[in-house]
C-alpha cells in the first residue's frame, strides 16, 4: 500500500479489499472456497477441513468460502490445519496432521494444488484411499493437477487469463489511466480426488 501511494503502475496478483490503493488481478477466492466445499458436500462428505495458512489473505478467503458452503449445508465449521506454502516444510507439516485428518475428516479442501498433492501422498502413505475414504480438492489448477494419480479435483484460477489481464492493466496504468482491479470468477475442475 505504501508503494502504491507513489507508484501507481504497480499491479499485483491477489485479492482486492475495500479501500485498497494498489491494483490487483486475481480470482474471487471466497467463491472458490465455496465451490470446493460444495464439491466435497456433493460427494457426500460431512466432516470438512481446510489445509493451509489462513494468515495469508487469499487463503483466509478460501477458508471462509469453505465455511460458507458448510453453513449452507447445515454442517459444522470446518477444521483448520495449518500448512504453509513454503515447499521445504510443507510435506512435514502435512504429515504431522495426517493422523488427525484420518480420524476426523472425510472431505479436505487444500489451499493450493501443491498442498493437496502432498496431502494425497501423505494419505496414501498411510493406506488411505482418495477419494474412497477422504475426498480432496486443490486450488490453482496447475498443469501438474491432471498428471497426479489420482488426478486432482481443483479450483481453476485461469492463470493465463489473469496474466493477460495483469499486462493489460499495467499498460493502462503506465499510460496514466486509473485502471481498476480485476476479479475473475473461479471454476471447479472435476477430476478424480473428489
Image (cartoon, rainbow, N blue to C red):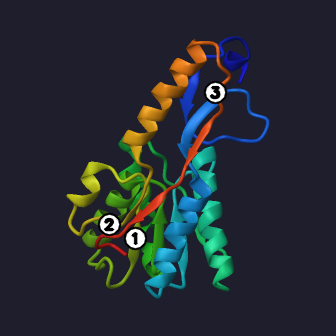
Q: Residues within 10 Å of mark 2 (few under 14, many from 20)?
A: many
Residue marked by disc 1? 136
Q: What element carries label 1?
A: strand
Residue at 58% in and 52% down: 28
Looking at marks 3 and 1 on the same chain, the residue that comes earlier in the sequence is marked by 1
Where's residue 114, x and y in %? 36, 52
Residue at 68% in and 78% down: 71
Q: Is mark 3 on a helix, strand or loop?
A: loop
* Mark 2 or mark 3, whichever is nearer to me: 3
Residue at 58% in and 67% down: 34
Where's residue 104, x and y in %? 51, 80
Looking at marks 2 and 3 on the same chain, the residue that comes earlier in the sequence is marked by 2
| 149 over 142 or under it: above or below | below
Alpha carbons under labels 3 and 1: distance apart: 37 Å
Q: Do the residues labelled 1 and 2 touch (CB within 8 Å)?
A: yes
Alpha carbons under labels 1 and 2: distance apart: 7 Å
Q: What element carries label 2?
A: helix
Q: How crowded is mark 3: few (under 14 residues within 10 Å), some or many (20 or more)?
A: some
Q: Is residue 171 visible?
A: yes
- In the visual, does 22 lie left or right of 135? right
Residue marked by disc 3? 179
Q: Do the residues labelled 3 and 1 touch (CB within 8 Å)?
A: no
- In the visual, does 37 lie left or right of 117? right
Residue marked by disc 2? 120
Where's residue 177, x and y in %? 65, 19
Amino acid at each position: 500500500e505504501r508503494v502504491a501511494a507513489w507508484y501507481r503502475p504497480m499491479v499485483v496478483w491477489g485479492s482486492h479489499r475495500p479501500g485498497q490503493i494498489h491494483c490487483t488481478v486475481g480470482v474471487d477466492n471466497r467463491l472458490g472456497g465455496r465451490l470446493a466445499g460444495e464439491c466435497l458436500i456433493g460427494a457426500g462428505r460431512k466432516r470438512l477441513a481446510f489445509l493451509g495458512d489462513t494468515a495469508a489473505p487469499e487463503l483466509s478467503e478460501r477458508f471462509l468460502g469453505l465455511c460458507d458452503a458448510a453453513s449452507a449445508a447445515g454442517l459444522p465449521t470446518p477444521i483448520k490445519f495449518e500448512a504453509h506454502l513454503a515447499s521445504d516444510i510443507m510435506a512435514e507439516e502435512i504429515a504431522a496432521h495426517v493422523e488427525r485428518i484420518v480420524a476426523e475428516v472425510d472431505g479436505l479442501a487444500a489451499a493450493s494444488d501443491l498442498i493437496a498433492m502432498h496431502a494425497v501422498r501423505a494419505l496414501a502413505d498411510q493406506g488411505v484411499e482418495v477419494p474412497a475414504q477422504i475426498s480432496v480438492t486443490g486450488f490453482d489448477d496447475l498443469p501438474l493437477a491432471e498428471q497426479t494419480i489420482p488426478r486432482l479435483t481443483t479450483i481453476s484460477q485461469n492463470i493465463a487469463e489473469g496474466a493477460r489481464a495483469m499486462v493489460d492493466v499495467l499498460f493502462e496504468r503506465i499510460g496514466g489511466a486509473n485502471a481498476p482491479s480485476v476479479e475473475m470468477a473461479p471454476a471447479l475442475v472435476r477430476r478424480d480426488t473428489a
